[in-house]
Image (spheres, rainbow, N blue to C red):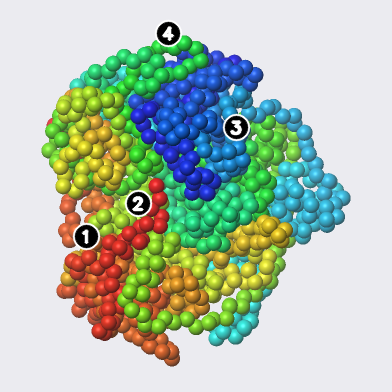
Amino acid sequence: MSAPRVLVLRAPGTNCDVETAHAFEVAGATAERIHVGRLMENPTLHKRYQILCIPGGFSYGDDIAAGRILATRMHHHLDDMIHHFVDSGDNLVLGICNGMQVLMRLGVLTAGVETPQVASATVGGDAVLSGQSDADGPGHDVPPATLTWNNHGRFEARWVHLSVDETPCVFLKGIEQMYLPMAHAEGKFVARDADALEQLRSAGRLPLRYCDGSGEIQSETLQFPCNPNGGDANVAGVCDGSGRVFGLMPHPERHIDATQHPFWTRRKTQPAEGDGLAMFRNAVEWFA
Amino acid sequence: MPLWQIDIHPAPQQLDRMGLHTADEIYQLGLGSDLTVAAARGFLVEGEISEQQARSIAATLLADTVTERIVVGQISENEPGDSDLLSEPPESMMENLAERGVEDQPHLVHVMSKPGVMDPVAASTQNALADSGLDAEAVKTFRKYWISGVDQSGLDAICRRALSNDSIETFVVGPLRMNELGVGSQGQFELVRVPIRSLDDAGLEKLSKEGQLYLTLVEMQTIRDHFASLDRDPTDIELETIAQTWSEHCSHKTLAGRIHYRGPATDGTADGDERQYDNMLKETIFAATQSIRRTLGDDDWCVSVFKDNAGIVTFDEDDHVCFKVETHNHPSALEPYGGANTGIGGVIRDPMGTGMGAKPICNTDVFCFAPPDVTPDELPPGVLHPRRVIQGVVSGVRDYGNRMGIPTVNGAVYFDRRYLGNPLVYCGNVGIIPVGMEDKEVKPNDLIVAVGGRTGRDGIHGATFSSAELTSESETLSGGAVQIGNAITEKMVLDVLLQARDRGLYNAVTDCGAGGFSSAVGEMGEELGAEVWLEKAPLKYDGLTYTEIWISEAQERMVFAVPESKWDELRELCESEGVEAAAIGRFVPTGRLQLTYQGEMVGDVAMEFLHDGRPPVIRDAVYHPPQVTPLGIESRDAATNTQTLLSILGSYNVASKHWVIRQYDHEVQAGSVVKPLVGPQCDGPGDAAVVRPKLNSQRGLVISCGMNPHYGDFDTYHMATSAIDEAMRNAVAVGADPAKIAILDNFCWGYTDRAETLGSLVRSAIACQDMAVVLQTPFVSGKDSLNNEFSYFGDDGQKQTIAIPPSLLISAMGQIADVSKAITMDLKETGNVLMLVGRTRRELGGSHFGLVENVSGGDVPRVDAVYAKEVFATVHAAIMNSEIRSCHDLSEGGLAVAAVEMSLAGGLGLELSLADVSRTDGEGDPLTSSEILFSESNTRFLIEVAPDQVAAVSERMSGAGVPLTRLGEVTSGTTVQIEDGDDVVLDVEIAAAKSAWQAPLDWH
């Protein structure tokens, strides 16, 4: 099998691109870090790649909201590329941390969930108020789910236990549990309503959940710090209906080597690799 | 042109986090209890934008429609516009108030940055709007608050002290009424000359102060005489350039100056040690490094020390590493967030501007604050409450380091009331640089290229201001010296820098820090000369004078020396990464610094006068250590010792810093091996960080620090040696090789024009020299920050001054050949043996026992450097031979605190006995058990050893003459129990100890 080619997308403020490319390489892929500007200049450049990975960082400073500006740019300028990776059926997409935030803003992770058309008069669940009548205003979709500020309202870095639910997600195949670090401020998964949450859950699209040490999946929201941000249903990752497009808030690329584990010094023998590597290997093997 | 106001509220079912947080802050600052606060954020967008477009922008770009609610309206200065609608408090707030029977309408307050202050979100928004095909003329962000439960006078205090910071922000009570957002307007060029030749001494002093030059009279006289000899007056830009170059911040004139020192001899004879320095730093700290390098000979591992922006040492065959620690104290006192933000941003640019540019791989941060429980009425005028300072500083470092993608891996926080007006913010950065890239040389006719952020009116006079004493007036006087950073701009500059370096697109690079272009170009062109075309510098807005362009300390700028033949390629590279670059001049072999604006010469100074014309600073320095009163502890019962232990664990200095640490990404770049918090619950206080900077290599760096301002009240010599010992202990405890540890000095001191204050500094520099030479531990870089004193007029009209305690930070960068040999301080396994390495003396001066028991006196801990070197080497050898499972250094609180920390970190108990600990302390009485528990003698470790390794460790230590005492065993119990003979002398539940340790700074 030839190694799949990974496009690790780089934008101003991306800062996990090097170690993410490294994780793909360790797993057997060929990874290249490409600036978003190169993709905009060369509309066919993306066709060389089979995996799109949007790594962690603070794209465009996370100004306005995390991932918002990069998602807006991609929406306006890289629609073909998104289509190539998301819709063609032959490719994979992985968004890690800021990358998941971008994918959520783009709507590709929650696509297919039935969305009521909401007139702007009820945007945000309350009257939208404007100086003039808003009856003729344009409607704006309320997406099925979003990522918002952690419950405690600030950036948090800590290791979390994760469990995998039954899922079509390619990246999580054969994985039951992982122990990975999270490092984010805006990673709390919030569904629009109970119905959207259930649509996603029942389709196996909420495959990665924060859990306590026992590894059991709980539907009740766990207390901090097991669930570090207070997200609905302890969701740490979301995939599309096909399982080829996946975003997660924790950082699998930071647990490739045994000495990245936070208390590896307590172990008398070290495992050959960290928990996160299996995800990258799954991506490579999907092309085998 | 319409001006749209877009308010974004939490959706009704969502928590109003900002409102709750603000109410809590107001309460914590003592400005009001039982207030109800609702908060929103918002945008002002000016442009030919229809209402539909404004609403579309709000819903698709600015707000999250799942969790937020939007209010859109148009505002203007004279028409009411939609101000009623925009002023309406959130329904949930009104319901809440109605339930409680409150009828008063809440006050509405808007807070926004002052014109010209960096607003990165606004800039990004404007770009994103352009992406969507909308042309906004200007964008501004703001916060708004509705506050109920306070009267008008209380509201004003809340606005000034809790909601906004006058240095950078302005607040508006009531609705916003304005027509446009424009900042800056085209100024008229006018060359300003300063008639200095006619000034007498009083006039010179007045000019120095009022012009914020902060030069001494002798320096002003020198400048006057220089221009008199040229037969002309200087222009304002010439005067500013000289002031920047001669500032304490840029030239370190005091410590590198002539000093006559008298201090106690080794045997304590007063004034028995008399020394005359021509350049104090060079003859102490730098001299130590030179001596070590000579001794190392062919094995010298220093590469570039004390000459570049950071000190460079060897790492492996392909790469070197460098380290720099800076302070940003004065700005952080005025605007903690911005000050700390640009402090870390600035020190990151140091490795970036070292050699041909290093890649930053980790950050450090050490802070000194007044305790957060200071009551508001104790605050002198003009001083921010320590709680606000702490919150601001921590978030400032967080937002810059995290956004840059550089892990913050090591730090410390110290508390003392004397930091009230002068908090200290030390920020460090380590970089990695390929072998062969450590040198740089500007070539004649290289273009001077400014890369990165645009130049604005921010940070005017930062370099000279840092030489001034802070006063209650500083906020109004020097607000312009405070800046807000934009980390992403710097990250983009870094992305460009590394590519340009590897493509060989420039001959030299340096950072634009204090003094702006003036310092950067002045330094780079020192040997050659330079001409600068000031109108070519890209500006944030119109209206800057040529002088402002030259001395602005706007952030995120680097200056490159670029050969003409490479300029096109560099410019294209910058464009491809979205980074702005402009050629603003040329290095020319004239020996002069020539500044032009729109073709007209505005400044022309000889480089020689600029760099060598400053009259030497000549100072006297004396040191008389305070009289020592003996302090011992009688043997006390277990309950009393346990109470003391819990008090020390709960003291701010020792208490867990998890609230700070967890806000920092300490693992980005994926090199983290030993994290700041260790153990199975990831909550134990690790001694030092281990970082693996290259993903394909097992070689690691060890980063640690040492500091203890309390010891300085006793003797700054022993404070300095103790700080070095602590930094070394911490590094060695995780596995660093003590034969290859590079250290950095950062002196933060009071007003060194006073001979006594300078004497205390010189004495500590002598200590650094002595200790470094014996340990063979070279200083590779350093920095000082002087005049850290705060003056104000008390209620009685008397001038009062708070001077910081002598604060020497030692930062250490060690190395470990194979990171898999590293160990941590958490207890590992039941049945293992706990042993004490080193000897304990009755050394309670400056101890935490003294602090929590409120007793003074005692002997300050000393270091026997020859012995310490042996201890470090032996402990290291045992760690490398895998004989030790865990290791923790003994510092604040001594043996008792260290043992309990190991226990709470590992979740395991201890049963220990002091029976075998040596009691002799020279001629004095034998040590009591309480003294053994709480003495803070240096060069000690606790080690956990598996039973089958005890013999090997014992043999190793005794072979090297290192005292080793078996204390007891690790248990599966829930307590730490320590006996002395038949008596239990300490007995504490681990859970109780942990909660005492975690509670004080467990902020939300």
Tag 1 residue: A266
Whether residue B31 appears in this view of the structure is yes
- Asked if labels 4 and 1 share a chain, the reply is yes
Residue drawn at 22 percent across, 60 percent down: A266
Q: CA distance from mark 4 to mark 1?
A: 64 Å
Amino acid on which the number 2 mark rests in the picture: Pro
Estimate the x, y position of residue B469 in percent, counting from the top left. 66, 56
- Asked if labels 1 and 2 share a chain, the reply is no
Mark 3 secondary-structure assignment: strand
> Outermost residue, front direction?
B101
- Asked if labels 3 and 1 share a chain, the reply is no
Estimate the x, y position of residue B648 in percent, counting from the top left. 40, 67
Q: Quadrant of the N terminus of chain B?
A: top right
Tag 2 residue: B693
**Which of the 4 image quadrants contains residue B112?**
top right
Q: CA distance from mark 3 to mark 2?
A: 48 Å
Tag 4 residue: A136
Mark 1 secondary-structure assignment: helix
Tag 3 residue: B172
Q: CA distance from mark 3 to mark 1?
A: 56 Å
Residue drawn at 55 percent across, 59 percent down: B419
The foreground one among A247 and A224 is A224
Amino acid on which the number 1 mark rests in the picture: Arg
Amino acid on which the number 3 mark rests in the picture: Val
Amino acid on which the number 4 mark rests in the picture: Asp
